Image (spheres, rainbow, N blue to C red):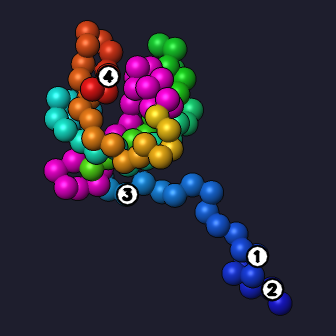
Amino acid sequence: MNKFGQFGIKPVAKGFEGDKIKMSKILDREIIVHAYRIEDSKVKEFTDKGSEKCLHLQIEFNKEMRIVFTSSSGLLDAIQQIPEKGFPFETTIVRDNDRFMFT
């Protein structure tokens, strides 16, 4: 009989840790971004407005690991330009009119 451990199967994606936090709680405050992933958005309100992707950020805020979800195209575009060796990095997320940006 085979045992699962013999197959050498590793998880494809590491789960993020910590509680979810709203963007409004971290705006204009320093955070550390440890990792990210982009998935199809499941929020009808955003998909109706043309935001088909959702950015999941694994952050450290006030020395606690937290998770932020956003459909911000500014953050989605910027995070994909950061090289893998660039993580983790310190940043502040600011609002510029209706757009979020890393600084």
Residue 42 magenta-highlighted: no
The segment highlighted magenta reads 61-81
Label 3 – label 1 distance at C-alpha: 27 Å
Label 3 – label 2 distance at C-alpha: 32 Å
Does dot 3 land on a helix, a strand or a loop?
loop
Q: Which residue is farthest bottom?
A: 1
User: Residue at label 4?
Assistant: 101
Disc sitting over residue 17 in the figure: 3
Residue type marked 2 = Asn
- Tell me the quarter of the picture where residue 18 sits: bottom left
Identify which residue is drawn at 52% across, 14% down.
Answer: 50
Q: Mark 2 near mark 1, Cβ–Cβ under 8 Å?
A: yes
Identify which residue is drawn at 26% across, 9% down.
Answer: 97
Q: Mark 3 near mark 1, Cβ–Cβ under 8 Å?
A: no
Instruction: State whether residue 31 is above or below residue 52.
Output: below
In this rendering, the label closer to the viewer, 4 or 2: 4
Q: Earlier in the sequence, mark 2 or mark 1?
A: 2
Disc sitting over residue 7 in the figure: 1
How packed mark 3 is, by other alpha carbons closer than 10 Å (few <14, some 14-19, many 20 or more), is: few
Counting from the top left corner in percent of width and height, residue 9 is at 70, 69
User: Residue at label 2?
Assistant: 2
Work out whether residue 34 or residue 4 is closer to the camera in this orientation and state it: 34
- Tell me the quarter of the picture where residue 21 sits: top left
Does dot 2 land on a helix, a strand or a loop?
loop
Q: Is residue 43 visible?
A: no
